Image: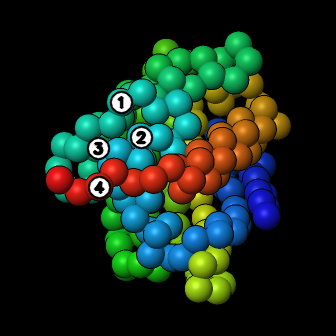
């Protein structure tokens, strides 16, 4: 199940509300969402993710939709953790097409022993060429990247985690 709602009347701002059900326990989903190696796999366009301090990462992401493409350099930060039920994920990045800043409250709700509902309440601001293309296009990009994110998480859940050394 996937529900994505983009709400905004401004061309430089998008508010997303997302719900998705994963067929895994909340603990398993929490681990996948916090494992640095797996994070690099599920963040759309992530080419590089390096921890610079606990729960803060330098990131390089290649993102492009239509004619607007760029390699964004910035940070990804996990904050306000209430394991295993919720946390905040913040992303900042800039590239030739502009900048993006976003913050998402990630809530993990137990539906059943092996069923978890992820509820995301996110705000994103964009600037530069990205913002100039208009709200409809910016909302479309946000929805596409969100679909990709959720599909990547699903794929990461299907792969077996490496055994600890």
Secondary-structure class at tag 3: strand
Task: Single out the mark in the foreground, 4 or 1.
Answer: 4
**How packed is label 4: few (under 14 Cα within 10 Å), some, or many (20 or more)?**
few
Measured in 3D between alpha carbons, the distance from the residue under mark 4 to the one under mark 3, in whole angstroms, is 23 Å
> For mark 2, what is the residue?
40
When asked about the image quadrant of residue 119, the answer is: bottom right
Measured in 3D between alpha carbons, the distance from the residue under mark 2 to the one under mark 1, in whole angstroms, is 7 Å
Residue 82 versus residue 135: which sits nearer the camera?
Answer: 82
Task: Single out the mark in the foreground, 2 or 3.
Answer: 2
> For mark 4, what is the residue?
163
* Label 2 with label 1: CB-CB less than 8 Å: yes
> For mark 1, what is the residue?
48
* Label 3 with label 1: CB-CB less than 8 Å: no
Measured in 3D between alpha carbons, the distance from the residue under mark 2 to the one under mark 4, in whole angstroms, is 18 Å
- Earlier sequence position, callout 2 versus callout 3: 2
> For mark 3, what is the residue?
57
Secondary-structure class at tag 1: strand
């Amino acid at each position: 199940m996937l529900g994505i709602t983009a709400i905004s009347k401004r061309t430089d701002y998008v508010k997303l509300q997302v719900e998705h059900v994963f067929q895994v326990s909340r603990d398993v989903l929490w681990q996948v969402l916090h494992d640095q190696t797996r994070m690099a796999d599920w963040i759309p366009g992530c080419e590089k993710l390096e921890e610079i301090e606990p729960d803060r990462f330098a990131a390089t992401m290649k993102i492009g939709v239509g004619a607007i493409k760029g390699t964004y350099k910035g940070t990804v930060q996990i904050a306000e953790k209430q394991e295993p039920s919720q946390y905040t994920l913040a992303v900042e990045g800039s590239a030739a097409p502009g900048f993006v800043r976003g913050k998402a409250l990630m809530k993990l709700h137990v539906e059943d022993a092996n069923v978890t509902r992820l509820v995301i309440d996110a705000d994103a601001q964009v600037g530069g060429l990205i913002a100039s293309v208009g709200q409809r296009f910016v909302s479309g990009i946000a929805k596409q990247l969100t679909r990709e994110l959720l599909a990547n998480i699903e794929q990461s859940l299907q792969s077996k985690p490496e055994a600890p050394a």
